[in-house]
Structures are given as C-alpha cells and as structure tokens.
Image (cartoon, rainbow, N blue to C red):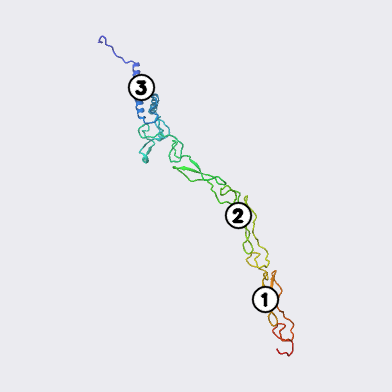
Amino acid sequence: MKKRGEKKFKLRNIDFLIILIIVILLGFSVIFVVIKGSAKEEEGLASLSPLSWLSKATASLLVKPQCSDGKDNDLDGFCDYSGCYTGKGKNKKWLASDPDCTSTSDNREACVPSAEICDGKDNDCDGLTDEELTKECGNTTTGICRYGTSTCSNGKWGECNGEIKPSQEICDYLDNDCDGLTDENLVKQCGTSNVGECRYGTSTCSYGVWGFCKGNIEAKNETCDNKDNDCDDVIDDGCACSAGQTKQCGSNVGECEFGLQTCSGGLWGACIGGVLPSTEICDGKDNNCNGLIDEVCGNLTI
C-alpha cells in the first residue's frame, strides 16, 4: 500500500540520455587532462585549446599509429617514422614497430624535416638516408677539363666520376692542360740526321698544325772537302783525296828530288818543287835517276 505523500521514482528515457551525455563528457575531460599534463614538456602543445586537445585525443584513440610511414598518424606532434627507441647516445636503438608509439613518455624524438645532407642520417624524414645526394667535383672547366660528379653514401662523399683532368699539351688546337692557352710553347725536333754536316732543326705548333722545319741541315753530295757532306759518317767517300791534303811525289834517286802534290777538287795536283829525271850525260852523275851513272858513256869507269 502506497503511503500518502510518497512518490514513486521512475527513470525516463530522457533522463538516461542526459546521464549518458554527462558520462561521455567526463570521460573526454579526463583524457584531455592526461594528454595535456603529459605534453607540458613538448613545445607548443600545452597551449592548445580544449577542443583541439579533444580532437587530438580522439584521433589518438581511433587512429592506429604506423611507426614507419613518416607521418604523424595519431596527431600527437611526433613524426611516427622517428618511432620509439631505447638507450642513449651510441647505444640508441630505434624500434620501428614499438606498440607504445602513441605514448608521450617513451623517450621519443620528434622528426623535424630539413634538407637532406651527407651525414648518414634521414634529415628529411622520408625513411631514406642520404638519398639522391650528388655534387660537382673537380677543379676547373677551362679548356677540355670538365667537372665530375660525387655521390653521397653512408655519410661520405664518393669518388669523383666523369671528371676530365688536365693532360699534357699536344698539337691539336685544344687546351689540353686547361690553362686557358692553346698549343702554347709546343716545339719539336725535325730533320733527318745529326751525323756529319747534317743538323736537326725545330718545328713549332700553330693552330693544331706543325710548321716548317727551321734551322735543319740536310745531306748533300760529297765535295771532297775533308767533311762528311752526305752524312753517312764517312768523310770524302768516293774522292781520291780531300781538299788541302798533300803528299810527296817524284823520286830522290840519283840527281832527282822529291816534290809535293796538293789535293784540289778531290784530285791530286801536279808535283811541285821536285827534281825530275833528265837525259843521262857523261858527267859522273845519275842524271836519269835509274841508279846507274853514265851507263851510256862506253868504257867510262864508274
């Protein structure tokens, strides 16, 4: 039996809905406080409005982090590619699939993209290290010289590939030694021989072509002048004598005396200064220079 003044409490549908809304709001408020408190050390995150934090909290609950795609999937201010790690300094070890990647208290570092440089690190946060890093190498592009290309690998620049370096200057109308000059100071020996009277000459390069041979002395016909005119390393070959050469001539038997011959034009000249044989006369002398005295004078005693 119902007592007078006593009212029976009945939970209506509208009352249940109001309670459910209050519980949900309380839940989000708790999440907001936890996330905001744990992020106080993270620059800029503590100043977000409750609605912004509520959005991030919802994303953190609904979005499963992918710790190797280089994106901030859970919107917690960290680039997921950086992942989680254990250890410090040289002992630092990245955990690309750590299930705690949504936590803000696991010693994570935010990946802040920057220009990729050759240091063995993923500076642009794309999951690759030192990718597509090349630079010019070499010293000059003057003349035929050209720069090469060096590629970064494991934080170090590699060899210079494709570089064209200076080389010895040659007569080709190109700047081979890359000094800004073409065919400079190029002189070479020319001629056929340096034997006897022959001498080498010199030829100078100009516009990629060797010039005429200058200063050279080539072989000539032998002139019997006590020189090797034909440059065969033999003096006056084919000549009876050499110019200026002399020799005794005639006889010194009896009344005869030696004379002297001089070479001229490769031939011996007349015998000059000697006493030649004469007709024998009976004078007690060997006039005909045959070794006999007055051999035609009868019984004349010698």
Quarter of the image with the N terminus in it = top left
Residue 60: image location, x then y, percent: 38, 28
Mark 3 is on which residue type? Leu
Q: Are the residues at dot 3 and dot 1 in contact (C-beta closer than 8 Å)?
A: no
- Is 278 located above or below residue 69 in the figure? below
Q: Earlier in the sequence, mark 2 or mark 3?
A: 3
Q: Earlier in the sequence, mark 1 or mark 2?
A: 2
Question: 104 or 177, which is in the foreground?
Answer: 177
Element at label 3: helix
The quadrant holding residue 100 is top left
- Is 262 located above or below residue 282 in the figure? above
Element at label 1: strand
Of badges 3 and 1, the one in the foreground is 1
Residue under numbered circle 2: 187
Residue under numbered circle 1: 248
Q: Earlier in the sequence, mark 3 or mark 1?
A: 3
Residue under numbered circle 3: 25
Q: Give me the residue at 47% from left, 42% from top.
A: 152
Circle 3 Cα neighbour tier, 10 Å, few/some/many (<14 / 14–19 / ≥20): few
Mark 1 is on which residue type? Gln
Q: Which mark is residue 97?
A: none
Residue 31: image location, x then y, percent: 35, 26
